[in-house]
Amino acid sequence: MSKLLINCRDLSYFSSLGASEQSTSESENWDLRQLNWTVETGDRVCFIYEDEEQKQVFWRLLLNKLKPKSGLLEIQSGVLVYSDEMLWTRARRNEGLDANLESKIFETRPWLNGRMVNVMQLIDRVGLSVGLLKIPLEKLQARDQLKAWLVMMMAAKVKVWLVDTLMKQIHGENLKLLMEWLSGFSGAWVTFKDETQTEEKLIPMMTSSVHLHRDGSLTGPSTPSLTGV
């Protein structure tokens, strides 16, 4: 049975220009306007946006970096919401992957294919050499940094993932592994894309899509097609 993770009710946010104070149009200048949306366990959502600033506002609201101007944004107790970017920027770059994985945010036995596995199995699956585990992340080659990033994502105790940057870089066998892991991930996955983008690497895994319009309104969810939404 699905469990509610995030609940948005009549959620509104406007810029400092103040749509409510300076605009004669109810829709003008609103980043979000009376948005109603829920996220549940098992959701795989493709979030389509028309304006990058609006996307950043909603992104920051979900990460508790902004407060709504009105309405409700409720994240259930104990639910950790993280972005792929946050995971990497908060990593200790002067330490290796093995030291980073000692943080309490990571599982020692993460889930893969419906069962708990040793984290070393994930490291082996992404093709990261054991000899690289103690090398500081900042000194790894870009391809190995990406592998370390993917291991941390799959091992993290995160219930809601907001994903953007990682999906632009991952491909090949690592993409297959991510899809394998995601098929058994018990939390929610929200990937963001601009309306002009036609490629969506994880379309087969998506359960729905929502569309944030320039007037701040949201439509959806709908079922994504293989050719785009």
Image (cartoon, rainbow, N blue to C red):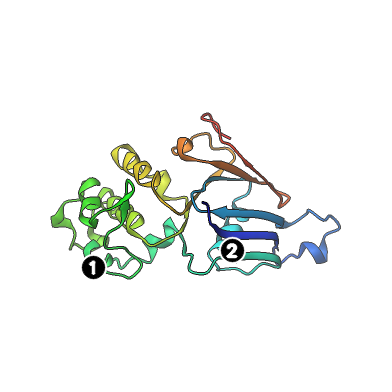
Q: Residue furthest left?
A: 131
Task: Indicate the secondary structure of the residue bearing disc 1.
Answer: helix
Left or right: 29 as drawn, with respect to 133? right
Q: As rendered, which of 189 and 171 lies closer to the eye?
A: 189
Q: Residue at x 82, y 60 (%)?
A: 23
Q: Earlier in the sequence, mark 1 or mark 2?
A: 2
Q: Is residue 133 left or right of residue 210?
A: left
Disc 2 marks a residue whose amino acid type is Leu
Q: Which mark is residue 61?
A: 2
Name the secondary structure under disc 2.
helix
Around disc 2, counting alpha carbons within 10 Å, would you say few (fewer than 14), some (14 to 19), or many (20 or more)?
Answer: some
Residue 226 x/y as whole percent: 51, 30
Residue 177: x %, y % from top left = 31, 43
What amino acid type is highlighted by mark number 1? Ala
- Residue 56 percent coordinates (x, y): 57, 57
Q: Quadrant of residue 92?
A: bottom left
| Horizontal relation, residue 193 to residue 97: left or right | right
Which residue lies at the image location 78% right of the left edge and 61% below the top edge?
19
Q: Which residue is mark 1?
A: 99
Q: Residue at x 76, y 65 (%)?
A: 18
Towards the viewer: 189 or 88: 189
Q: Are marks 1 and 2 in contact (CB under 8 Å)?
A: no
